[in-house]
Amino acid sequence: MLRILGVREVDQFESYLGLPTLIGRAKYPTFSFLNDKVWKKLQGWKGTLLSRASKEILIKAVAQSIHTYTISVFQIPMKLCDELVALCAKFWWGKARNERKIHWRSWDKLSTSKKDGRMGFHDLRAINLAMLSKQGWRMIQETNSLLYRCFKARYFPRTSFLEAVESPNNSYVWKSMLAAPLILKSSHCWRVGNGCSIQVQGDKWIPNFPSHRILHPPNDDVEGWVVVDLIDHELHE
């Protein structure tokens, strides 16, 4: 097949467009190239000659942006997240010769917003989940896209993306994408249009209300009811 098509065989850990092509059970070695990239960047900067403001800019604009493309597709291992955070923390606090300086504040404190008096560094795990949730939102909004049609045919042909579950032999991209429905379902609320797709009892659709759901269902059996059943169309004529 290689000879007929005139193509070469791809090695297991080669990348395509900067992303790994095949991911095995060991996820950490697959994504360890992120650690190497950040370490090389930090080693090339003369940390002892930089002010705090310069270090802040370099960490936010460079060190914490190298992995943006990767974490928008894959959920990277927690161990790798911790190592990337540790590299940035060491650069921020600096070194005294070959000894590590004291870290006077935890990185969790430094990652808090500047509005709260902190440094506003990125929380890598939170950013990873936010990027995957953004991809999930695109899956909901752009149902005509090739990405949506491929994933739907393969992983959730009989349900919606928000109700999709992990299936046997699924890819790591899909496993990563499944982090999105949990986040989206916890924070999203329907904007009522014609009401044909919104479940009265199960979905969140009531605006300006803490739970966005009805508290006390009517005495009638509401299973299968959608919001359109509650709309009096004569009032709109």
Image: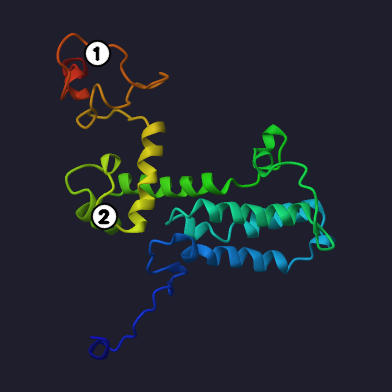
Residue underneath mark 2: 151
125 left or right, relative to 20: right
For residue 169, the mark is none
Residue beneath the point at 53% across and 47% down: 125
Position of residue 83 in the picture relative to residue 131 (left or right): right
Q: Secondary structure at mark 2?
A: helix
Camera-nearest residue between 17 and 167? 167
Q: For residue 12, which quarter of the picture?
A: bottom left
Above-or-below relation of 112 to 131: above
Bin the neighbour count of mark 2 within 10 Å (Cα to Cα): few under 14, some 14-19, many 20 and up: some
Where is the N terminus found, in terms of image quarters?
A: bottom left
Which residue is farthest top?
219
Quarter of the C terminus within the rendering:
top left
Q: Nearer the viewer, residue 125 or 51?
A: 125
Provide the residue designation for mark 1. 217
SS category of the residue bearing label 1: loop
Q: Is residue 201 left or right of residue 17?
A: left
Mark yes or no: residue 237 visible. Answer: no
